[in-house]
């Protein structure tokens, strides 16, 4: 199974540990380090865009996710704590035939996730 893994996939993070575990289990996994755009931004950019949930950083995260989905063609997206993942991004992935597993906070409501992300599951 091809899994696109979204999260903070840097050394010492549990997301990276889970991504590696999926690989050890024989899954083909590609990762998108969704925290990286925040790390490049200034303190003020981070504060404003996190508060209003819009802006160039949020746009970049969603672009990176969609591009990775187009390039990798996963059968499943595993998204951890993706509160800046937009509804239209979920819809675009669903249109590509991707199922989603969403963990933690996501920018869409649980009902929107269930209907727009196919037969995926949502957990906290």
Image: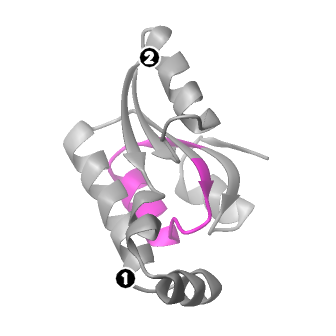
Which quarter of the picture shows residue 17? Answer: top right
Residue at (47% x, 86% y) in the render:
45
Residue 80, image x and y in percent?
60, 47
Can residue 65 be seen here? The reply is yes
Q: Which mark is residue 23?
A: 2
Please say if 59 is above or below 79: below
Residue 72, image x and y in percent?
25, 38
Give whichever of 97, 32 is nearer the camera: 32
Q: Secondary structure at mark 2?
A: helix
Q: Secondary structure at mark 1?
A: helix
Please say whether residue 59 is one of the residues in the magenta stretch. no
Give the residues drawn in magenta, as a range.
Answer: 80-101
Please say if 53 is above or below 118: below
Please say whether residue 83 is one of the residues in the magenta stretch. yes
Residue 115, image x and y in percent?
60, 57
Query: Dot 1 corresponds to which residue?
Result: 56
Neighbor class of circle 1 (other Cα within 10 Å; few <14, some 14-19, many 20+) is: few
| Separation (CA) of disc 2 from disc 1 | 32 Å
Residue at (34% x, 70% y) in the render:
60
Neighbor class of circle 2 (other Cα within 10 Å; few <14, some 14-19, many 20+) is: some
Q: Is residue 25 left or right of residue 1?
A: right
Please say if 66 is above or below 25: below
In which quadrant of the rendered image does the N terminus lie? top left
Residue at (70% x, 67% y) in the render:
109
Give whichever of 56, 97 is nearer the camera: 56
Please say if 120 is above or below 67: above
Residue 42, image x and y in percent?
44, 82
Can residue 53 be seen here? The reply is no
Question: CB of mark 2 within 8 Å of CB of mark 1?
Answer: no
State the residue lying farthest toward the right: 124
Residue at (41% x, 59% y) in the render:
36
Compare marks 2 and 1 and give the one earlier in the sequence: 2
């Amino acid at each position: 199974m091809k899994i696109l893994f979204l999260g903070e996939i840097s050394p010492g993070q549990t997301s990276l540990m889970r991504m590696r575990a999926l690989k050890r289990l024989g899954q083909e996994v590609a990762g998108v380090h969704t925290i990286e755009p925040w790390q490049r931004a200034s303190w003020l950019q981070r504060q404003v865009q996190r508060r209003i949930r819009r802006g160039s950083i949020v746009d970049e995260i969603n672009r990176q996710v969609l591009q990775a989905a187009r390039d990798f063609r996963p059968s499943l997206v595993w998204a951890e704590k993706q509160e800046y993942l937009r509804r239209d991004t979920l819809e675009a992935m669903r249109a590509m035939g991707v199922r989603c597993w969403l963990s933690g906070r996501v920018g869409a409501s649980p009902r929107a996730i269930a209907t727009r992300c196919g037969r995926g599951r949502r957990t906290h």
